[in-house]
Amino acid sequence: MRRKNAFTLIELLVVIAVIGILAALLLTALSAAKRKAQQSACLSNVKQLTLCSYLYATDTGTHANYDDNPQTFSLWMGNPNLSNQLKILVCPSTLQSTSGGPGPGAADMPWVWNNPPSPNTYTGSYALNGWLYSKTMYSATDNPLFMMNKQSMIQKPSETPVFCDSMWVDCWPLETSPPSTDLYNGNFTDEGMARCTIARHGGVIPAKASQNFDTTQRMPGAINVGMADGHVELVRLENLWQLSWHLNWQTPATRPQ
């Protein structure tokens, strides 16, 4: 009587292990592809916001009273054409839930902001370069000469950020601004570079970004940045100080720690 061919227990375990390894490799590849797609969609969002700001500033028709201002609050938050466009204002790498109410965002979370006494609440995941505002406020009050509140004052359009990934609405980076040690949450209380040094793109998993990073080491991750000349690019966190954030920016010889 012939024995029927059958798998032994060891053979079954080997097959299961191989299937598990292949599944893990496949999931990793799919996850990386998904993050890449989200990064590209985010780049498109920043592109649209940046071009919108340029059209707003150069409009000589209905909005001629804006007097060549690169940005104003009415553009960024008060403009109803933008404030309701979550697909543009929110990076797809962030979760869409805003159940936590107003507050800062994170690498994988959008920020939620309201502006009393206005009843409106806004959601987004990008910051405006505060040095481009039409009026001096917050951190800029200590350095009013750094403001670029007219298009003609932008010295290096291809290197001057307008919009970028961030955990809050706006930021005022300085050459001496250190990065945040928390690459997941950023640092809301620091209005400089710490608001946009979040590991959202560049091959990292935002939800797993370090919350206690040694800033003496090379920084992982990247953010999308839209420049004043209209182009957008993925910029490594380590290279953010190479951009020209305010008037007469002097690139530091070494990155602040």
Image (cartoon, grey):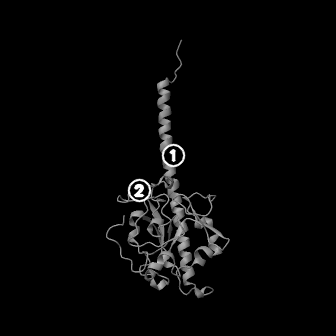
Q: Amino acid at mark 1?
A: Leu
Q: Residue furthest top?
A: 1
Name the residue at 49% across, 29% down: 13
Quadrant the C terminus occupies: bottom left
Q: Is residue 229 visible?
A: no
Task: Kindly identify which residue carries mark 1.
Answer: 27
Q: Amino acid at mark 2?
A: Phe
Relative to residue 151, is residue 88 depicted above or below? above
Relative to residue 50, is residue 208 depicted above or below? above
Task: Kindly identify which residue carries mark 2.
Answer: 213
Q: Is residue 45 visible?
A: yes
Count neighbours of disc 2 (C-alpha within 10 A) and say few if under 14, some if 14 to 19, many if 20 or more.
some
Relative to residue 256, is residue 204 depicted above or below? above
Q: Which mark is residue 8?
A: none
Count neighbours of disc 1 (C-alpha within 10 A) and say few if under 14, some if 14 to 19, many if 20 or more.
few
Q: Residue furthest right?
A: 119
Q: Position of residue 139 (x, y in %)?
A: 47, 75
Q: CA distance from mark 2 to mark 1?
A: 27 Å
Name the residue at 51% across, 41% down: 23
Check disc 1 and report its element: helix, strand or loop.
Answer: helix
Q: Nearer the viewer, mark 2 or mark 1?
A: 2
Q: Position of residue 11 (x, y in %)?
A: 47, 27
Quadrant the N terminus occupies: top right
Residue sitting nearer the eye, 130 or 45: 130
Residue sitting nearer the eye, 200 or 246: 246
Q: Position of residue 128 (x, y in %)?
A: 52, 72
Q: Earlier in the sequence, mark 2 or mark 1?
A: 1
Q: Quadrant of residue 202?
A: bottom left
